[in-house]
Image (cartoon, rainbow, N blue to C red):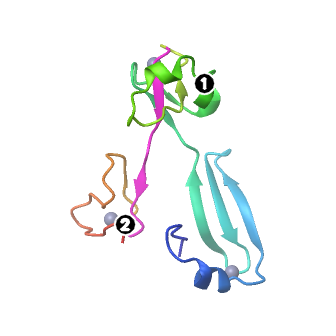
Amino acid sequence: MAFNLRANLYPQLLAHRGHMIECVEYGDGVNMALECMTCSTVLMTQDKPEVRCQGCDWTGTEEDMEHVGANIPDLGQRVMPGEPMPAGECPECGALAHVIERWTCPDCGLVWEDGTHACTSPDCHRDADA
Ligand SMILES: [Zn+2]
Ligand SMILES: [Zn+2]
Ligand SMILES: [Zn+2]
């Protein structure tokens, strides 16, 4: 079972006390996983964040952008209060690019990115926040 980072991890960590935990890279760094070698269990997995440009639909990673985070020129004037912080500036058109947020259903494996925290599969009524 994978770790739910919002949950109390103590019982789950206790179950792996003294085990060999390794951080493993998959697909040339596209995905990182924390695995217990003793139990052959994936504890946690995280995909490399992908970003998408608001202006031209360019997608890439933070490494593809010249100006990221606080280095974005005129950041204060380009982001309105309450707006999500951009990840960087699009190398194609110079518009702001944001990290694409994706959710994966732990039950059926469906991946979605529309911002709802509940599984959108009609066959699965899992609430991902539960
Ligand atoms: Zn273990
Ligand atoms: Zn762009
Ligand atoms: Zn589901």
Distance Cα–Cα, label 2 vs label 1:
32 Å
Identify the residue under disc 1. Answer: 65
Residue 3's image quarter? Answer: bottom right
Q: Position of residue 13 (x, y in %)?
A: 65, 80
Q: Which residue lies furthest to the left in this view?
A: 122
Locate residue 91 relative to residue 39 in the image: left or right. left
Question: Residues in magenta?
Answer: 94-107
> Does 96 sit above or below residue 27?
above
Residue 64's image quarter? Answer: top right
Secondary element at image label 2: loop
What amino acid is labelled 1 in the image? Met
Query: Which residue is located at x 50 percent, y 73 percent?
Result: 7
Locate residue 122 relative to residue 11 in the image: left or right. left
- Quadrant assignment for ligand 1: bottom right
Residue at disc 1, CB closer than 8 Å to ligand 2: no
Q: Which of 6 and 81 is in front in this view?
A: 81
Q: Where is residue 5 in the image (x, y as percent from the top left)?
A: 53, 67
What amino acid is labelled 2 in the image? Asp
Q: Which mark is residue 129?
A: 2
The C terminus appears in which quarter of the rendering? bottom left
Q: Which of 66 and 79 is in front in this view?
A: 79
